[in-house]
Amino acid sequence: MSPSLLKQILKIFKCPVYIVGGALRDSLLGKTVTDLDIAVANKHALGKKAGELARRLNASVFPLDAENLVYRIIAAPRNKAALPVRLRRTSGRNRPQKNKKAVRFQIDLAPFQGAGIIEDLKKRDFTINSMAYSAEESGLKIKILISKGALKITGIKKGKVIDPLNGMKDLATRRIRGCAWNMKQDPLRMLRAFRIASQSAFSVDKDTLRQISLHADRIRKTAPERIRDEIMMLLENPESHVYFKDLWKAGLLFKIIPELQPALKCAEIYYGKGGALKHTFLVMERLEFLFKNLNRLFPKCNKIPYLKGNREILKFTALLHDIAKAPRAKIINGRLRFFGHESFGAEMSEKIMRRLRFSKEEIKFACRIICHHLRPGNLGHNRIISEKAVFRLFRDMGEETIPLLLLCWADYASYISRDTLETVKNKLKKPPIAIPAGGLPRTGLKKTLRFLQVINLLMNSYAEKGKYLYLKTAKIITGNDVMKILGIPESPAIGEFLESLKMLQFEGKIQNRKQAIEFLKRLKRLKSSKPR
C-alpha cells in the first residue's frame, strides 16, 4: 500500500472523501489500524468504483451491505512481513481466522447515510466514532503507511477533525457515549459499547449504561452470529471477566444467555451472594490469571502447542461450565448436590452455542470439556493416582487434555483468594499432599491445595508422556505386526493389543520396537502354555 492511497480513492470516486469511524478514532489515539472506513459523498456506481480500487490494490472486494451500498476490500500489502493481524469478523461461517503467514487489512467504503457528512456522523453509534477527516481539504498531507503489518495514518491535524458530537472530548476522557440513542436502530451497538471499551480501556458513559439497561431486550432482534462475533472479540481482552460482569450489570448477559440467570441465586450457601454466577466469573478471572502466569506455574509445559493458541473459546467454555448446576441442584442427606450437572451442562451448552451459530468444532470442543470437567477432581480424591488412571484420562481427552486441565485449575483456584494463591504458589508444584485417614475436608485450603497439586502433576505428566497417546509419534509397532506375531486374524482385539502397548509406553515399561515385540511374544507363550 503506497502513501498515495487517498489520492487514488479521490481520483476514482471524483467526490469528497472522508476517513471516519474507528480508523480515525484509533489514529487519534496513536494506534495502527487494520480496518479503514471511508465515507464518500457520491454513491453513483459505488460498486463499480470499489471494484476498480480493489483491482489497483490487487485485492478482493464484496458487498458487505448491499442495501446500503457498503463494500469491503480485503488487501494483502506489498510488505510481506509475516505478522499476525486479526481481521474484523464478518458473519456466519465466513469469519476470518488468524493467519500469521498473510498480513491483511481491509477497507470499508460507504456513501453518506444522509444529506451530508454531518448528518452521516450523527447517525453513527458512539461519539468517538462520529468524527470525520476530509482527505481533499487536508491537501493530501495525510499518509497511510504500513507499520508492523497494519496501517498507520499520519499527518492528521486535530483542529481539522469534523466533530459535531464532541467525540474528541469523549476520546480525551476515555468515555463511550451513545449518539442520541441510535442503538435503537441497531441493538448490537449495546454489546459493541463494551467491546470497544475493552479494546481501548474506556468506560461506558452512565447515561449510555442506563439506556442499555432500559432497552437490553432489543438485543434479541440481532442476528445470533453478530452477537457471537462481538462476544468472541470481547473475550480477546486479557481481563474479559470484568466486561462480562458489566454485561450482567447492564442486563445484557441474561438476554443473550438466559440459561445463566438461575445461577445468580443457585448455591449461595457455598458461594455467597451471587451464587454460581459469582463462582463462574471467578473461574473466568482465574483462567485469565493462569494465562498470564503459565510459564511461572507450569514451566515444563510451555512447549505444548495449545498454551499459545486461541484462548477465547476456552474462556467462553468457562462461562458455561456450571450452567446446569441450578437445574440439577438437589438436597441429598442434608447437603446441596449437583449430580449430573456436567453431562447436562454439556447438553445445555450445545443448544446455546448452536443458537449463537458457533462452529461444530467449537461446540464439540466446549461440550467435551464441560462434560468431563469433574474427572481430574475425581482422580484427586484417590489416595493413589495410578499411571493407568492418568493414561485413561489422557487417552479419552486426547488433544483436549490441556484445555481441560487449564479450566479445572481455574475452577479449583476460584475457591481461594488471589492473595492466598500467591502465598501458596511455591507449594503448587510439589507432589499432591497425602489424603488423611479421615479423608479430605469438604472445603478449605487443604482440599484446594491438593487438587491444584494434582493438576500440576497431570500437566507435567502430559508434557513428558503425552506423545505416547498419538500413533504419529509413538508408532513403534503396527496392527500387522500384532497379527503376525500372535498368529491371529484381523479383529477388534488388534486395537486392544495396540492400546495396551501404548499404555506400557506411557508407563515407561516399553521404549522401543524390540521391547514391544518381546512383550507380544511373551503373550503368545503365555497363551500357548495355558491348558485347553
Image (cartoon, rainbow, N blue to C red):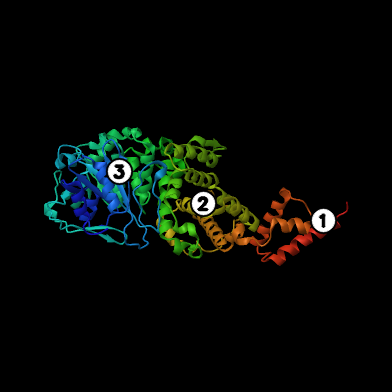
530 sits left or right of 476 in the view: right
Specify the amino acid type for callout 3. Arg
Whether residue 60 appears in this view of the structure is yes
| Residue at left offset 31%, top offset 41% | 63
- Sequence order check: which comes first, mark 1 or mark 2? 2
- Sequence order check: which comes first, mark 2 or mark 3? 3
Residue 40, x across and y down, in percent? 19, 44
Element at label 3: helix
Whether residue 131 appears in this view of the structure is no
- CA separation in Å, label 3 and label 1: 68 Å
Specify the amino acid type for callout 1. Lys
366 sits left or right of 515 in the view: left
| Residue at left offset 47%, top offset 50% | 411
Are the residues tagged 1 and 2 within 8 Å (C-beta)?
no
Extreme-right residue of the structure: 532
Q: Which residue is mark 1?
A: 527
Residue 410, x across and y down, in percent? 46, 52
Q: Which residue is mark 2?
A: 404
- Sequence order check: which comes first, mark 3 or mark 1? 3
Residue 490, x across and y down, in percent? 74, 50
- Numbered label attached to residue 192: 3
Q: Residues within 10 Å of mark 3 (few under 14, many from 20)?
A: some
* Relative vertical location of residue 189 with respect to residue 152 in this rendering, above or below: above
Element at label 1: helix
Depth order, front residue of 173/382: 173
Specify the amino acid type for callout 2. Leu
Element at label 2: helix
- CA separation in Å, label 2 and label 3: 30 Å
- CA separation in Å, label 1 and label 2: 40 Å
